[in-house]
Structures are given as structure tokens and as C-alpha cells.
Amino acid sequence: LHEGCKVGEVESQHGKEVDDLIQQLATAVSAADPEVRWDQMLLCDRLAAYARSVAHFPTAVKEFEWRNGVFYDITKRAEAAGRPDPCPAHTAGLKAVGVIPS
């Protein structure tokens, strides 16, 4: 999405976009499993702190099945049931980097 960025650059330069994505994904997970509840702002703050701790890491989509795949499965289940994608920004990002077909 932001080609060549390190994790720390994403956190510092694209924070609003990241927070929006985290909130979208958290909402989708809670809708799929109502027992899962979050304080979304705390979640964003903690993930930002983690990103700062690994700021030098390159960004990548890896270990798809147990990282991004969980959210993409929620998308596929919603679409199969005739509902809109609850994670449209995530799905668009996966398509943009070529992980799933466009």
C-alpha cells in the first residue's frame, strides 16, 4: 500500500489510516463473534506502541493463513451470506498487494 515503508513509518506517517483499518477489523471480529469485545482506541494505541517497538521491520503480508486470513475469512463468509464485506479496506489492501485476486 505504501511501498517500501518500514513498520515505524506506517505508524508515524499513516496513523489515521491504520487506526481506521484496526477499527474496521475489530468491528468485523465483534460482529462475527459477539463475545469478543474491545476498547477500540486502546487497541489502536497498543498496536501503535507495538509498531514503534518494531519500527525497523519491513512491512509485508506473510503467514497469511493465521494473520490476514482470519479477517479475509470473515469477508468470505459475509459475502457468501449475501452481506457486504465488513472489512472493505483490508480486502482492498490484499488485492492491491496481489495476495488475493482482484
Image: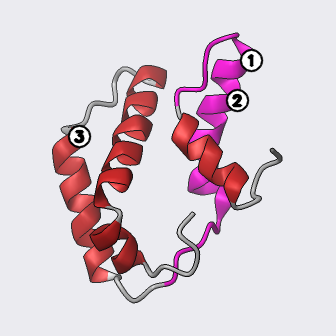
Q: CA distance from mark 1 to mark 3?
A: 27 Å
Q: Quadrant of the C terminus?
A: top right
What mark, if any, has residue 76 been given in the picture?
2
Which region of the structure is painted magenta? 58-86
Asked whether the beta carbons under mark 1 and mark 2 sit within 8 Å of each other, the answer is yes
| Amino acid marked by disc 1 | Ala
Q: Position of residue 101 (x, y in %)?
A: 83, 47
Residue 26 screen position, x and y as percent? 37, 37
Q: Going by the image, does 79 lie left or right of 87?
A: right
The location of residue 30, given as percent across then percent down, is 38, 27
Q: Determine whether 22 is above or below 99 in the image.
A: above
Q: Is 15 situated left or right of 65 in this image?
A: left
Q: Which residue is mark 3?
A: 40
Q: Residues within 10 Å of mark 3 (few under 14, many from 20)?
A: some
Q: Quadrant of residue 84?
A: top right
Q: Give the class, few, some or many, for how many residues have Cα within 10 Å of label 2's Cα (few <14, many ≥20).
A: some
Q: Nearer the viewer, residue 75 or 14?
A: 14
Magenta stretch encompasses residue 66: yes
At 45% from the left and 85% from the top, the residue drawn is 57
> Residue extending furthest right?
101
Q: Nearer the viewer, residue 92 or 42?
A: 92
Kind of residue indicated by mark 2: Lys
The structure residue drawn at horizontal position 41% and vertical position 46%, both measured from the top left corner, is 21
Task: Name, please, the residue furthest toward the bottom.
Answer: 56
